[in-house]
Image (tube, helix red, strand yellow):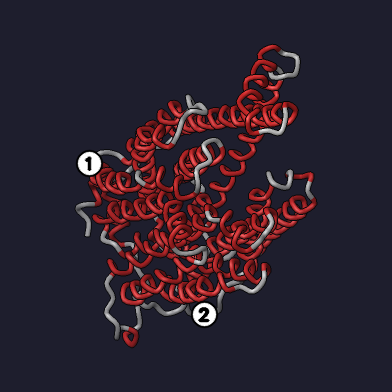
Amino acid sequence: MDSHVTTVESKVEQAPTQAPAQPAQQSIATNPYVGILGVFLGAGLATLNARLVSVGLADLRGALGLGFDEASWIPTALNMATMFSGVFIVFVNVLLGPRRILLIAAAIFTMVSALLPLAPTYWAMVALVVIAGLASGTFYSLTMTFVLTALPKRLIIFGIAAYAADIVFVSNFASAVEGWYIEHLSWHWIFWNAALFTPLMMLCVYFGIPRRPPSAGPWPSWRGFVYFSLGLSLFYGAMDQGERLDWFNSGTIVAMSVAGTFLLAAAGIRRMLQPNPTLNLSFLNTRNIIIIALSIFVFKFEHLATIVLVPGFLGNIQEYRALEIGHALAWVALPMFAVVWLVAFTIVYTNSRLVLTLGLTIAAVACWFCAHVDSSWAGNSFQFLELALACGFACTYVGLVSSIVLEGLEAGALGSFANMATFSGFMHFVRIFGGQIGVAVMTRFITVRERFHSNLLGLHVQVGNWLTDERVRMLSAGLSSGSTGPEEAQQRAIGILSQQVRGQAYTMAIADAFILIGWTVVAYLLLMLFLRPGKISYKALRNMK
């Protein structure tokens, strides 16, 4: 091992893992492994809560009698609040530490989740959803921070595997959970799920994360963080609602975008005039950190294959109900859960970037095969491809998070709480905001391609064309027995033919979306060629305490 590696390892060894606690505050013995279980539960519950609200939106609309426009703002409000607190918590964490934040946030999240189904009005529900998002948004950002500072260095890779298993497993299992709640319990459990399990997280945090005293001296200004967090939240909302409201043809989207731009500019000016010591942006100014961070966006974009494209196809073309979609997707969660541990062991003896590359490649190849989808495909048609995607996602997520951690360790993320908070907050920002950019791009792409294919198909499906007329006659003959006359049978036949054209256009748009994911992965793999070689590895970390 060369001298540079030895130097880096010695710095990692000497880096503070947690702030010294006051003697008077050591009455409760804490176990870091219990604390890690707590933060993993928090990240998983926050992910599951967001997915349940998203996939259960149609059931919420039906139960509450909400219109499509009204209901669409419920998940948007939740995710905007999550975006805000996920960034702002960087400031609060440096001052208060994760224990106080998580206990308070978890208690609020539990109470609000219990009250949400009982909200008397729509606006009361939106307000409670915002509070829930502000509370649960803290769970994501503090998870990896605590893993890095509490686990022995030799076990960090397995903490990463647990984190990956937690997030990826929950994302694939959410549809099945929501469908089961609707079929066997009620829509209330979309929210009560969090109220039931969050107290367990609180117990783990209480007995697993040590106290540390608040930062001494006057607190730095929080205004810059508020400006930046609000600006990002507004941009997030604009992207989430953009396709529904026709983007900049909507006054709402324009207002949110202008306000977000103003707030981000204000945050930038305040940063130049009065830098906040709890944030070290220069720490992020390295090529490797930026390129590796982009892998989060690529993974989130690639993951849309199983959380948007396949469910969208099954729901729109095959008319699957939520529970049926859940059954078609949930089974891969178990293989994925097992694969992440195998990947973790592999990374110890190989290279995290190679595993990341392998995972992206496997998923991209699976997407290329999915691009052959046609309207005859059903849930079982995707089984082999879903398994390939699951293995690819498991390799990708463990590979990218482990690569991110190594870059942070090499750059000195553990050298100070400001560096660690900045690094963790930046990665969380890319995960949430970058993920929403991917969703907005994919939604717009599918809409545009569906219109394109519909117009092309429409050129060949016109009255007077002998193939069209023959198709209408065949459909009319089949519908004549259930119609009052030939005219009604013909009108019903024309309606069915129109639905078939729309279905075929949507299927072709889904196929194009799979191809887009494949080319996005290819572009990122080329970008990875510009990464500088890493100086430390997990094999070296195994020898560290």
Residue 407 in view here: no
Report the residue at 51% width, 37% height from top: 318
Q: Residue 217: which numbered mark, if any?
A: 2
Within-10-Å neighbours for mark 2: few <14, some 14–19, many 20+: few
Q: Is residue 500 left or right of residue 181?
A: right
Report x, y in % for residue 206.
Answer: 35, 77
The quarter of the picture where the N terminus appears is top left
Q: Is residue 258 above or below residue 328?
A: below
Q: Secondary structure at mark 1?
A: helix
Report the residue at 46% width, 30% height from top: 377
Give the amino acid type for the residue marked by disc 2 in the picture.
Gly
Q: Secondary structure at mark 2?
A: loop
As measured in the structure, the alpha-carbon distance from the residue carrying label 1 to the one carrying label 2 is: 46 Å
Residue 56 versus residue 163: which sits nearer the camera? 56
Report x, y in % for residue 187.
Answer: 52, 63
Q: Is residue 404 left or right of residue 478?
A: left
Residue 176 versus residue 370: which sits nearer the camera? 176
Image quadrant assignment for residue 97 = bottom left
Q: Is residue 12 above or below residue 388?
A: below
Q: Which residue is mark 1?
A: 349
Report x, y in % for residue 157.
Answer: 29, 51
